[in-house]
Image (cartoon, grey):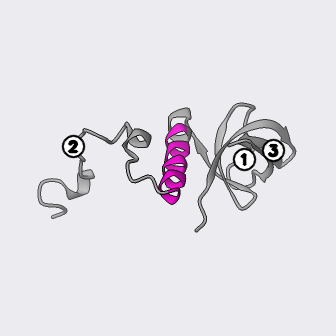
Amino acid sequence: MCIGVPMQVVEPVGSFAWCEGEGERERLDMILIGQQAVGTWVLGFHGTARQVLSATEAAQARAGRLALAAVLAGDSCVDEYFADLVGREPRLPAHLRNGGLR
């Protein structure tokens, strides 16, 4: 299974940038998203920054990765990693509400 890693830009270098996340430092190719300022969160995957993330999205991605690690370690209760989802009613996307598209 391959999962992107939320990383923060620490040093732009040409079309690449040194990024840090989850205790790792990696040189990411920025060609897909363009050069980003120091402090910007990106989703790194196979040596390439695939998407710019907000701080909230980066935190949610990190929580999801921690939840996966917890499950793999045998923990069956991962609600604490999904505080933004627990206890709220899911909302359908607009195109599926009121009987869907017509």
Return the mark for residue 89: 2
Camera-nearest residue between 65 and 92: 65
Q: Secondary structure at mark 1?
A: loop
| Cα distance between the residues tagged 2 and 1 | 37 Å
Q: Is residue 97 above or below residue 56?
A: below
Q: Position of residue 80 (x, y in %)?
A: 40, 39
| Cα distance between the residues tagged 1 and 3 | 10 Å
Residue 8 is drawn in which quadrant? top right
Camera-nearest residue between 72 and 59: 72
Residue that numbered label 3 is attached to = 17
The amino acid pointed to by label 2 is Glu
Residue that numbered label 1 is attached to = 34
* Mark with earlier residue (2, 3): 3
The amino acid pointed to by label 1 is Gly
Q: Determine whether, in the image, residue 5 is placed left or right of residue 100.
A: right
Query: In which quadrant will I find the C terminus?
Result: bottom left
Q: Determine whether, in the image, residue 25 is placed left or right of residue 56.
A: right
Which class describes the residues within 10 Å of circle 1: few (<14), some (14-19), or many (20+)?
some
Are discs 2 and 3 less than 8 Å apart at CB? Answer: no
Residue 10 is drawn in which quadrant? top right
Question: Of tags 2 and 3, which is closer to the observer?
Answer: 2
